[in-house]
Image: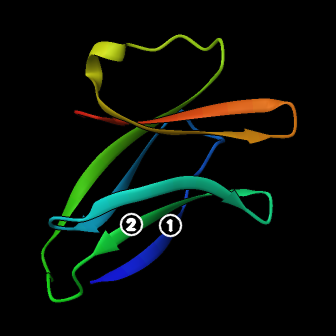
Amino acid sequence: MIIYKYNVPIEVSFFDLALPLGAEILAFQTQDGLPKLWVLVDPEYIHEVTRHFTIRGTGDFFDYKKADSYIGTIQMSSYVWHLFETKE
């Protein structure tokens, strides 16, 4: 197993990541002031799946019924962002 780091775009509400099958999200934090996602992956898996995410600021509306799981919250200056994995 190995831990990879992925950039998280905050300029869009929804984004996709191609992750190896079985990847486990470990953390959502900032590094050098930029949002990152740390993911535990098995480098032996060559099959990737597309996983869907939504990032919302505090006070932003979104359809929570489409959220599969809450990933985490970060604070960047005066903004607070919340990351969810979604069904689509």
Q: Can you say which quadrant of the picture contains the N terminus?
A: bottom left
Residue at image mark 2: 39
Judged left or right of residue 40, residue 58 is right
Q: Secondary structure at mark 1?
A: strand
- Camera-near label (1 vs 2) is 2
The residues tagged by marks 1 and 2 sit, at their Cα atoms, a distance apart of 8 Å
Between 51 and 74, the residue placed more toward the observer is 74
Residue at image mark 1: 6
Three-letter residue code for mark 2: Val
Can you say whether 61 is above or below 85 in the image?
A: above
Please rate how many residues cluster around mark 2, counting C-alpha atoms within 10 Å: few if below 14, some from 14 to 19, many from 20.
some
Between 72 and 20, the residue placed more toward the observer is 72
Q: Residue at x 12, y 75 (%)?
A: 47
Asked whether the residues under the numbered discs 1 and 2 touch, taking CB atoms below 8 Å apart as contact, a structural biologist would say yes
| x then y, percent, for residue 67 | 31, 26
| x then y, percent, for residue 6 | 50, 67
